[in-house]
Image (cartoon, rainbow, N blue to C red):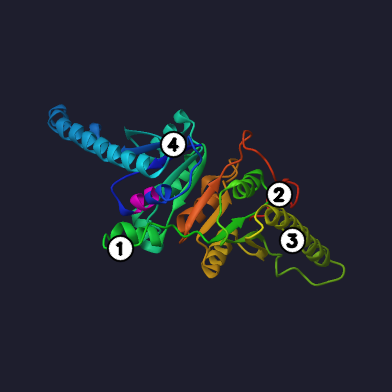
């Protein structure tokens, strides 16, 4: 297992680091700590100005390397039998992290997110969303209120604990979605988790004419048959997962609506701690990515999983129709 942790000097980044630090990892897990610094705009500076700021930039890099060295030491002390390396890169954050993940052959990128919504989110932007689009591997976006409380309140005496007791698994029948189910099945969970498998299907048009000579009845009948097939597939997935985790609760839901809004509303109402969702289809435009928008707007942590030929497959991808999301 190779885990790339994106770090900066924000509390959200520190919460992501604490999340990694607090977990159980397989022996021999490798961690790579990476900070990406934004370069000075050379095109807007005169040569003399570049020379003046060069020492400051070098000092900035050295200070960042010291920061990463300290984090690496903490990780080695917290996780047995692990390997930790680190580096500083300069450039666009999402592009450099994606390149680092590709060069290092990372299995997952872990990144913190501010988790803001509305105008605050719009003004700040979301590096996490951009990473979801560019990463060549799985991405985990950490938004943990309990961990954030620890890193922002040093007076807390309780041990660090990331509570991921309510897990929402989004299922649409695509290879990436099935990979998410496989990841769920192979992950190490405790006995007190509750899981819900959620599929979202586009509703039938409400304005279809109700005549026995029209296609309205046929369309609605086919729609109901589709829902039944999805429920049967989710029931099959749930049975497989229950056999794997006998002391854990599983349920499933099929809901009609727009994928992003429905997932976010259900996660909020159900009080999910973690959303597991397959990465977007590369054939779709980035703005159509359900995973990107869920990662950006969710109030809880999000795990984005990509299908990989080398990943061990334990669940059939034929249980429900593909491309349920609209």
1 and 3 marks in contact (CB < 8 Å): no
Q: Is residue 32 above or below residue 13?
A: above
* Residue located farthest toward the bottom when viewing the structure as drawn: 210
Q: Earlier in the sequence, mark 3 or mark 2?
A: 3
- Label 2, on which residue? 322
Task: Answer whether residue 16 is magenta in the image.
Answer: yes
C-alpha distance separating marks 4 and 3: 43 Å
- Give the number of the mark in front: 2 or 1: 1
Q: Position of residue 35 (x, y in %)?
A: 33, 39
Residue 40 visible? The answer is no
Q: Secondary structure at mark 3?
A: helix
C-alpha distance separating marks 3 and 2: 13 Å
Q: Is residue 127 above or below residue 242?
A: above
- Give the number of the mark in front: 1 or 3: 1
Q: Earlier in the sequence, mark 4 or mark 2?
A: 4
- Label 3, on which residue? 231
Closer to the camera in the image, 228 or 243: 243
Q: Earlier in the sequence, mark 1 or mark 3?
A: 1
Q: Quadrant of residue 308?
A: top right
Q: Position of residue 253 (x, y in %)?
A: 67, 64
Q: Secondary structure at mark 1?
A: loop
Q: Which residues are magenta?
A: 12-17
Task: Answer whether residue 275 is magenta in the image.
Answer: no
Prevalent SS, magenta region: helix
- In the picture, the disc for residue 156 is 1
């Amino acid at each position: 297992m190779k885990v790339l942790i994106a770090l900066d000097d924000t509390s959200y980044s520190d919460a992501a680091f604490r999340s990694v630090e607090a977990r159980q990892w397989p022996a021999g897990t490798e961690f790579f700590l990476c900070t990406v610094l934004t370069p000075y705009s050379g095109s807007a500076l005169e040569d003399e100005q570049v020379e003046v700021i060069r020492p400051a930039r070098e000092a900035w890099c050295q200070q960042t390397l010291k920061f990463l060295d300290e984090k690496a030491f903490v990780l080695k002390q917290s996780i047995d039998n692990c390997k930790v390396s680190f580096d500083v890169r300069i450039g666009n954050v999402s592009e450099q992290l994606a390149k680092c993940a590709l060069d290092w052959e990372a299995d997952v990128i872990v990144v913190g997110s501010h988790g803001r919504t509305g105008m605050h989110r719009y003004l700040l932007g979301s590096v996490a969303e951009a990473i979801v689009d560019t990463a060549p591997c799985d991405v985990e976006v950490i938004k943990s209120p309990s961990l954030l409380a620890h890193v922002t309140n040093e007076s807390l005496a309780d041990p660090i604990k990331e509570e991921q007791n309510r897990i929402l698994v989004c299922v649409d029948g695509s290879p990436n979605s099935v990979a998410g189910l496989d990841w769920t099945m192979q992950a190490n969970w405790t006995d007190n988790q509750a899981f819900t498998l959620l599929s979202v299907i586009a509703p039938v048009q409400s304005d279809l004419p109700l005549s026995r000579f029209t296609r309205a009845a046929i369309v609605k009948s086919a729609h109901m048959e589709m829902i039944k097939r999805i429920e049967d597939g989710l029931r099959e997935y749930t049975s497989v997962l229950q056999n794997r985790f006998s002391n854990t609760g599983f349920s499933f839901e099929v809901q009609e609506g727009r994928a992003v809004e429905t997932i976010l509303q259900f996660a909020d109402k159900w009080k999910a701690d973690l959303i597991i969702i397959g990465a977007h289809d590369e054939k779709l435009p980035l703005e159509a990515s359900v995973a990107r928008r869920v990662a950006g707007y969710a109030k809880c942590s999000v795990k984005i999983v990509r299908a990989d030929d080398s990943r061990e497959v334990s669940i059939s991808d034929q249980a429900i129709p593909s491309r349920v999301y609209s």
